[in-house]
């Protein structure tokens, strides 16, 4: 799969690092894209195991397919209907194509909840 061909706005998405030569141990790491630095032409990303956000070129970011996120640990962000869930860790259980939402199990909440990818 050639991930570098896609030019969609990645900010806010959960994606993967690929093809790094200087830090190959980061390849395959799932990250959350925080912003785009237009001066440096790099995306600021954060993820598990990264002590602070790092800047990555577009060619080293792979937007996931809808089902690639199943099984991943994610952090809930920008959820206005249930702000108390923001910043909580969840596990993606499945992707619901009919509603374009993910069933996520949020620690301490109980049953899986359906959320959009941007959250």
Image (cartoon, rainbow, N blue to C red):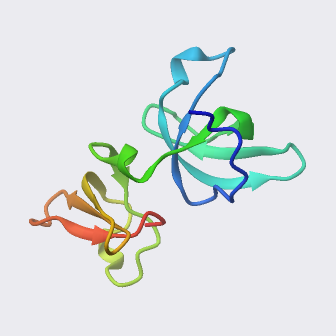
Q: What residue lies at 67% left-to-right and 46% top-to-bottom? A: 44
Q: Position of residue 23 (x, y in %)?
A: 62, 17
Q: Quadrant of residue 17?
A: top right
Q: What residue lies at 33% left-to-right and 70% top-to-bottom? A: 115
Image-based side of 56 in relation to 119, left or right? right
Residue most toward the right? 39
Q: Position of residue 59 (x, y in %)?
A: 72, 35
Residue most toward the bottom? 81
Q: In the depicted view, which residue is nearer to us: 8 or 50? A: 8
Looking at the image, residue 11 lies above or below residue 6: below
Image-based side of 59 in relation to 88, left or right? right
Point out the image quarter for the N terminus.
top right
Q: What residue lies at 69% left-to-right and 15% top-to-bottom? A: 22
Q: Position of residue 119 (x, y in %)?
A: 43, 67
Image-based side of 61 in relation to 29, left or right? right
Looking at the image, residue 37 lies above or below residue 119: above
Q: Quadrant of residue 9?
A: bottom right
Looking at the image, residue 57 lies above or below residue 85: above
Image-based side of 15 in relation to 100, left or right? right
Q: Position of residue 34 (x, y in %)?
A: 61, 55
């Amino acid at each position: 799969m050639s991930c570098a061909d896609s030019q969609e706005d990645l900010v806010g998405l959960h994606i993967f690092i690929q093809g790094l030569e200087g830090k190959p141990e980061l390849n395959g790491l799932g990250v959350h894209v925080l912003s785009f630095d237009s001066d440096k032409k790099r995306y600021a990303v954060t993820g598990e195991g990264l002590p602070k956000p790092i800047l990555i070129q577009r060619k080293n970011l792979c937007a996931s397919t809808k089902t690639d996120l199943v099984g991943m640990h994610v952090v809930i962000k920008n959820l206005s209907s249930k702000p108390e869930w923001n910043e909580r860790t969840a596990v993606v259980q499945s992707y619901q194509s009919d509603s374009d939402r993910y069933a996520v199990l949020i620690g301490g909440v109980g049953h899986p909840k359906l959320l959009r990818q941007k959250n």
